Amino acid sequence: MEYDNTNRGSLFKNDRKDDAKFPDYKGSINVDGTEYWLSAWIKLSKDGNKFMSLSVKNKNADSSLKPKKGIKQEYDADLPF
């Protein structure tokens, strides 16, 4: 029996972070059967609390199509680190 990964994902520490703009963590996530690349950056809030800023990108999206400048799909989550 195959494991169902629907609505599940994982992140792994980015051991190839050569630039500050590169994500701290990379991985993938499945949302309602659609596969996405998942990236995360550890950031510090104005109050001094650490949080993860997330970005998702459809794995099947045409990579030659770039998003409009200034538009970024980003989600913030308060996680204890």
Image (tube, rainbow, N blue to C red):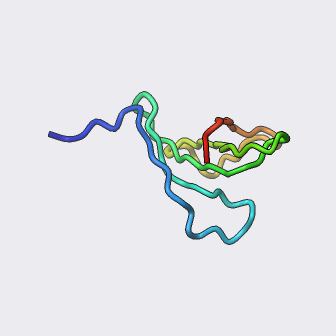
Vertical side of 55 occupied by 20: above or below: below
Q: How many marks?
A: 0
Most foreground residue, 24 or 7: 24
Q: Is residue 17 left or right of residue 8?
A: right
Q: Is residue 22 left or right of residue 7?
A: right
Give x and y (percent) for residue 51: 68, 43
Q: Is residue 25 left or right of residue 9?
A: right
Vertical side of 28 occupied by 71: above or below: above
Give x and y (percent) for residue 9: 44, 42
Q: At 43% from the left edge and 37% from the top edge, which residue is drawn?
A: 30
Q: Quadrant of the N terminus?
A: top left
Give x and y (percent) for residue 7: 41, 32
Q: Is residue 10 left or right of residue 50?
A: left
Q: At 63% from the left edge and 58% from the top edge, which residue is drawn?
A: 24
Residue at far right of view: 46
Quarter residue 21 falls in: bottom right
Most foreground residue, 17 or 69: 17
Q: At 79% from the left edge and 42% from the top edge, which residue is drawn?
A: 45
Q: At 59% from the left edge and 70% from the top edge, which residue is drawn?
A: 16
Give x and y (percent) for residue 73: 69, 37
Quarter residue 56 falls in: top right
Most foreground residue, 24 or 59: 24
Vertical side of 15 occupied by 78: above or below: above
Residue at far left of view: 1
